[in-house]
Structure formats: structure tokens, C-alpha cells
Amino acid sequence: MHQATWDPQQYLRHSGHRTRPFHDLLSRIPELPHTPAHIADLGCGPGNVTAVLADRWPDAHITGLDSSAEMLEAAQEYAGPTPGGGSLHFRRADAATWTPDQRYDLIVSNAALQWVPNHPDMMPTWIEALAPGGTIALQVPGNFTSPSHALLAELCDAPQWRDRLPGHGRGYVHILEPAGYLELFDTLDCTVDAWETTYVQLLPGDDPVLDWTKGTALRPILTALTDDPAARDEFLAQYRDLLRKAYPAGPRGTAFPFRRVFAVATKKS
């Protein structure tokens, strides 16, 4: 996994579109086995989605986990007791190695496991940490063959950049299709709900797809070029020009298809 320095404010610039899949995921999570519930949000980012969990389960004890110090700092504004008698707190953890130290009623991960190549191998450990009747719920992007990511990979592999950005070209082969997550969780003796959705989003402003990727897919590349502003700006200009052709602006904004893969797996009681 490429290390990246995260910018919470850049990530949140499109928070409305980014959180829509999470609300769809949340609507498919069944009743949890205990009240108050213990919930882990794996890859919690700046905490805005973790706070939504407290709206659904106001008395729950919720822990947000992330490997980014920048994201955890931003999440602290949500930390503390919740109006329903529960609590929100945040701590550092790497999903690639995280082993739960307690029983959870729900482990949720929203748009994070694409950064964790070994996450399918971690599922038995996480399922084991669930209380009987507990649930793992995840959603990950499924748009790695779309122009936004394919063009980025091609640019990283171009002669001008391949030595500067080794290994940044193509990845994400560890992201499963919905049927793959269904099969994975079925072998772990879970009841599984797996599906996909493509949201066609109308993004406003100039070069909005570039602005979108600055919050996510571009982070490792911007981190790798952080000590060379001229190279960073040239890379962004080249990528911008490719995106303008792939995603032409319309009179009301730029249409950006956004495919997501979901899975909700409930451990049998």
C-alpha cells in the first residue's frame, strides 16, 4: 500500500457525494445483537461518517480507527459523549494489521479497504471478533477501470514519470467484485448481502474530477512529489488535460460515474 499524507479539508470538499454510499450501506445493516452496541469504524477518516453511526445507534460506544494522524486530528471534533448516552472516540490503527481487542457488534468500513491489499485475508480475524449475530459492513470503490483511475495509472507508467512514481501505476486488484465478497463471507459462515451501485454525480466547478481525485486517488502521488513542486504541478497539469477530454463539462456541471461495491455480512448466532 502506498503511503500518503492526507488532507481532511480536501477530502471533505465533496463530502455530500462521498457520504451517499455510506447512507445506503447503513440502511442495509440489520439489528445489532446488544444494546448498547460496541462499534468499530475502520478507516474512519475525518470522523464525519463515524458521527453518523451515533445518529443510528445513539447509545452505542463507537471507536473510529485510522492510520492517518491528519485524519484523526480532524476527527477529534466529534469525540466525546453522545446525546443518547453513548460515546465516540478515535485512535490510531492500521487496518492491514488491526486485531480487535474486544468483542464488537458491528465493524464498519467506508471507502477505506481499497488501501489495504490484504483485507480479504483479515476477514476471518474480524469475524472472530464479532459477537454472535454481529455484522461486518463495507463499501469500497469499484471504479478502478474508469477513466479517472485508468488515465492516472497510464500517466504514472509514462516514461517521464515511471522512475519518479514506481509502483503507483496500477493496483487495487485486491478489490473483489460483489460476488467475490459474497463467496468470501459465505465461507466464513455468515449471512451475506452484496451488491453494487453506480452513482452518476454532477460535479460543479472547473476541473471537478481533478479536484475530486486530489482528495483520494492522487494522495500517494502528491505525497511522492511533495518535495518537487514543479514536477507536482506538471503532473497535475498533464492529468488535468486528460480528465478534461474524458469528462467534458456540461452546462450544469461535469457528470462523474462513481461505482461502489458493498457487502454486509452477519455472523450467525
Image (tube, rainbow, N blue to C red):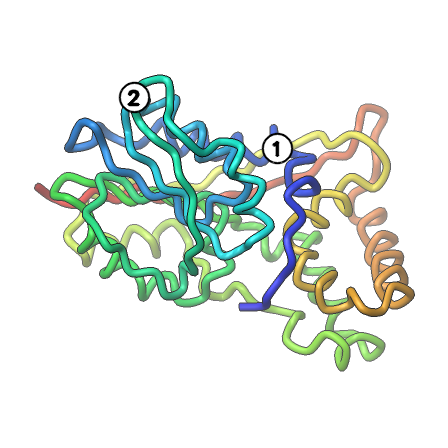
Q: Is residue 104 left or right of residue 204?
A: left
* Above or below: residue 152 compared with residue 12: below
Q: In this view, does 199 lie to the left or right of 23?
A: right
Q: Which residue is nearer to you in this view: 186 or 107?
A: 107
Please provide percent x and percent y for residue 267. Answer: 17, 45
Please provide percent x and percent y for residue 269. Answer: 8, 41
**What residue is rendered at 40% in x and 34% in y?**
25
Residue corresponding to mark 1: 15
- In the structure shown, which secondary structural element does the residue marked by tag 1 occupy? helix
The type of residue carrying mark 1 is: Ser
The type of residue carrying mark 2 is: Gly
- Which label sits in the foreground, 1 or 2? 2
Q: Is residue 23 visible?
A: yes
Please provide percent x and percent y for residue 184. Answer: 27, 58
Q: Which residue lies furthest to the front in this view?
A: 80
Q: Which residue lies furthest to the top in this view?
A: 83
* Above or below: residue 136 compared with residue 236: above
Q: Which residue is nearer to you in this view: 198 or 102?
A: 102
Q: In this view, does 146 lie to the left or right of 42?
A: right
Q: Which mark is residue 85?
A: 2
Q: How much space separates mark 1 and mark 2, taking CA atoms?
A: 27 Å
Q: Residue furthest left?
A: 269
Looking at marks 1 and 2 on the same chain, the residue that comes earlier in the sequence is marked by 1
Q: Residue 159 carries which label?
A: none
Neighbor class of circle 2 (other Cα within 10 Å; few <14, some 14-19, many 20+) is: few
Neighbor class of circle 1 (other Cα within 10 Å; few <14, some 14-19, many 20+) is: few
- In the structure shown, which secondary structural element does the residue marked by tag 2 occupy? loop
**What residue is rendered at 58% in x and 40% in y?**
74
